[in-house]
Amino acid sequence: MPADSQTTAEVLLPLALAGAYTYAVPQGLAVAPGDYVEVPLGPRSYIGCVWRIGSGDGGGKTLREIVQKFDVPPLGDTHRAFIDWVANYYIEPIGNVLRSCLRAPGAFGEARSEIAYRIGPHRPAKLTPQRARILEIAREGPALKASELAELAGVGTSVVKTLAKTGALEAVALPPHRAFATPDPAAGKLALSPEQEAAAQELRAIVTRRGHKVMLLDGVTGSGKTEVYFEAMAAAFASGRQVLLLLPEIALTQQFIQRVERRFGAEPARWHSGMRPRERERVWRAVAEGTAQVVVGARSALFLPWAKLGLIVVDEEHEGAYKQEDGVPYHARDMAIVYGALGKFPIVLSSATPSLESLVNAERGRYGHVRLHARYRQAELPPSHILDMRQLALSSGSWLSEPLAQAVEETLKNGDQALLFLNRRGYAPLTLCRACGHRIDCPNCAASLVEHRFRKQLMCHHCGHTQAIPPECPKCGTPGKLVPCGPGVERLAEEAAQRFPEARLAILSSDLAQGTLLKDALRDVAEGVHNLVIGTQLVAKGHHFPHLTLVGVVDADLALDSGDPRAGERSWAQMAQVAGRAGRGEKPGRALIQTYQPEHPLMQALAKGDRDGFLAQEKHLREEAELPPYGQLAAIVISGRDGHETERFARALLPLAPYGEGVHVLGPAPAPLHLVRGLYRWRYLVKARRGINVQAFIRAWLTTVKPTGSLRLAIDVDPYSFL
């Protein structure tokens, strides 16, 4: 190499950039692809990742130098290839994808010790009851942080600090990060049924071979799928590999976390958006070092810097929650499969109601297909009975038919639990004025405000706008004429409390209970503290309620009329999943489904328990229309603050679209929800046959398009939201 030659590094930054920037490598600093470094950009510095190493003079330019290299395990080849793949597939700046991998900036600094307190050598001159409680706790237990001591003693942290100053408590440094325990593959193993054991053996064999293979674990609700894929996880642990267990709703899974801990004798690492920064640093670093062997996480856990990932399990793989709508619009299930292909390790997809995409791939032989037909321990699947609401008159203000109300009453008298399911939050979906017909809408969105009577406010479920319930009509000024229209879970709970005054009622809805409150509520339902549950889709997500014997679906027609091509499939999954909450214990269960469309194929299939017949019809409809999984879709959404400017810009794009055989451009048209958060929205749908490079088509169309002002253009490959 010539004496004046300079080593350079292509450094990718977590910004909306299409490629890496070139930096000079200082003398004496050795860097390699995957190393994390600090580099200057403008007046600031950023943490980036070395993507490539080169040598030269930087094209005659004076290059800025790398500031430092961090003492962190480098990002592996597989993970960098994965970032490239995601960026290319979703037509996203690669820097935005890297940003998803750097969600714990504190992990790059020196690990900080935390201060804890234990009993000290001196007694305080004045011993108050509060101080006495703290000293008693400190004397009997391990060193605790000030906040932990204060919480246990029911005092403020200032009392702890005062005792430390007097020498009554002694400060000690805790290790920077508590290590994660190693899971034991044999700990907590349960006896499996013959059908479960056969399925587990098939999954264990795939994991042991270590090649890439996608396995669809397809079992009826209550069939014990979790224990089966636990066996696949155990096989991965036995070979020293890391395991990622993806869940659609990580915030709702305290019971599940405890179940994983019981099975493997070690608490799993968790990864989700609600984590505290210090715990986020701990998990990120442990994953990078390979010391966190099992992670239970939401979709973003896929982007953790895995050291030796050997298995990904996607639980409830059909769930739409795996699709990220903001930022990089990826689908975690699909990208887990891509990661497994790049890293040459297996993927297990588990569901009682698999997605059509997964079922079609299994039929074509691309995925292995393992089925569990029977519930665990001879429990029976609950039959579904259709209640034709055209024949059952409801009294004014009532939403429960007499057959459903009588079934609830009988269930409660027998000492069992009943669940009333209505997938609509709040008290009422809209508020109308009886005097002038005015509807109270959101000022920022093309949507009605939902009344939340418990909070005494109206709320928009799209932008979060809230306002007090007005005493008079905002348009005509007439007092006392505003009326709620339609039921939400709060209104249903009001009726249930009147009909069943002795019931121990609980409402399970994400806007009423979150975090610890929700975990406590789910635990109380599982333990039988509540015998009547009113719930939204939150209750259909795999919870085990052993005392529940009746499920009543109050309005099964909510999702049937929709422009979403997956509406039928989603409705089937939701109805089947919520009905499957019943009869999971010793007693049999049943489901009653209220509908005004009993002749609808979905209702007929639910009544007959004919999943395969219904899905065969769905497949036929999708195939005829060349919709996923038999075709491809990509959405292009143009948004802006000025409605006329947004429409003009959207329409001006159509003449720029190139011709592509097998590609159809639909639009532009106002999005179904044409105003959200003050932005007007227009949409194109690009529809293409399988095998066509739809990304190349979109790049050829839009690469030179540059929105200005408030205008924005977003591309969503494989859209799941059609609002």
Image (tube, grey):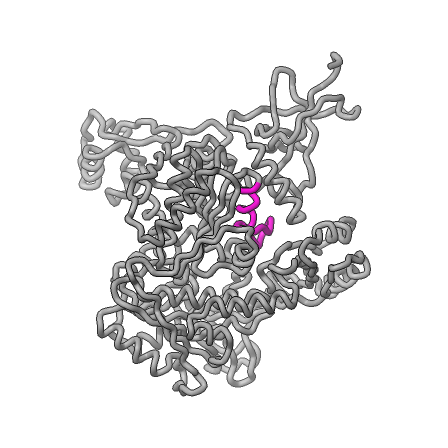
In the image, the segment drawn in magenta is 324-341
Quarter of the image for the N terminus: give it. Answer: top right
Image quadrant where residue 438 sits: bottom right
Q: Position of residue 488 (x, y in %)?
A: 43, 72
Queried whether the magenta region covers residue 395, the answer comes back as no
Left or right, residue 445 beside residue 689: left
For image coordinates 39% across by 62% down, the residue present is 539
Residue 696: image x %, image y %?
73, 50
Residue shown at the point (77%, 63%) measured from the top left? 651
The front one of 265 and 412 is 265
- Look at the image and tell me in which quarter the C terminus lies: bottom right
Residue at the far top in the pictured view = 3
Residue shown at 34%/78% (left/top)? 404
Q: Does residue 153 show up?
A: yes
Task: Estimate the x, y position of residue 416 in percent, counting from the top left.
Answer: 25, 69
Q: Is residue 493 above or below residue 339?
A: below
Q: Nearer the viewer, residue 661 or 541?
A: 661
Q: Nearer the viewer, residue 390 or 198?
A: 198
603 to 461, vertically: above or below? below
- Residue pictured at 62% horizontal, 56% vertical: 718
